[in-house]
Image (cartoon, grey):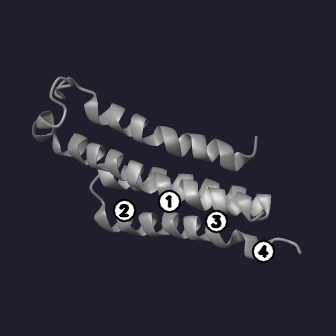
Amino acid sequence: MPIAAWCLMFVTLMPVLVVGYAKSGGVYDNHNPRQGLDRLAAKKRRAYDAHLNCYEALPVFIAALFVAVWTEGPQTMVDGLAIGFVLFRVLYVLAYITNQATLRSAVWSLAYLCAIGLFISSFWAPV
């Protein structure tokens, strides 16, 4: 299985992993999950918000990876951009949770550029 496919699986699991952290510690009320958000500590609330952003980023990555594979972008480039996307998204979540807004915006932009790179990777495919 190509590295990019493993990256896709990880990005798909990220929201679940991040919300697991947000819910840990016993304050989260799973009977009323949306009402319980106000009782979360600031760090856990930011983790919950990062969890939502993971879902928001997922369609972009899926579409970009689909286009890269469909248009036969070079596999090493596709894999590298997929790894970059994953690493920047992990850094994004960490920056979000630790309240580092400037870093969070910077790594969000870098992850987005990796997705754009996937969309246009076929330009570097051999003819």
Front of the two marks 4 and 1:
1
Residue 112 as seen in the image, left or right of residue 68: left
Nearest to N terminus: mark 1 or mark 3: 1
Mark identifier at residue 104: 2
Which quadrant of the rendered structure holds the C terminus?
bottom right
Tally of numbered tags: 4
Residue 37, quarter of the rendered image? top left
Front of the two marks 4 and 2:
4
Residue 16, quarter of the rendered image? top left
Mark identifier at residue 60: 1
Residue type for callout 4: Trp
Which quadrant of the rendered structure holds the N terminus?
top right
Nearest to N terminus: mark 4 or mark 1: 1
Mark 1 lies on a secondary structure that is helix
Distance from disc 4 to disc 1, alpha carbons, whole Å, reads 21 Å
Q: Position of residue 70 (x, y in %)?
A: 72, 60
Q: Position of residue 36 (x, y in %)?
A: 13, 33
Using the image as rendered, state which of residue 65 and residue 54 is in the foreground: 65
Nearest to N terminus: mark 2 or mark 1: 1
The vertical placement of 102 against 35, above or below, is: below
Using the image as rendered, state which of residue 120 and residue 84 is in the foreground: 120
Mark 4 lies on a secondary structure that is helix
Distance from disc 1 to disc 3, alpha carbons, whole Å, reads 10 Å
Mark identifier at residue 127: none
Front of the two marks 2 and 3:
3
Nearest to N terminus: mark 2 or mark 3: 2
Circle 4 is placed at which residue position? 124
Mark 2 lies on a secondary structure that is helix
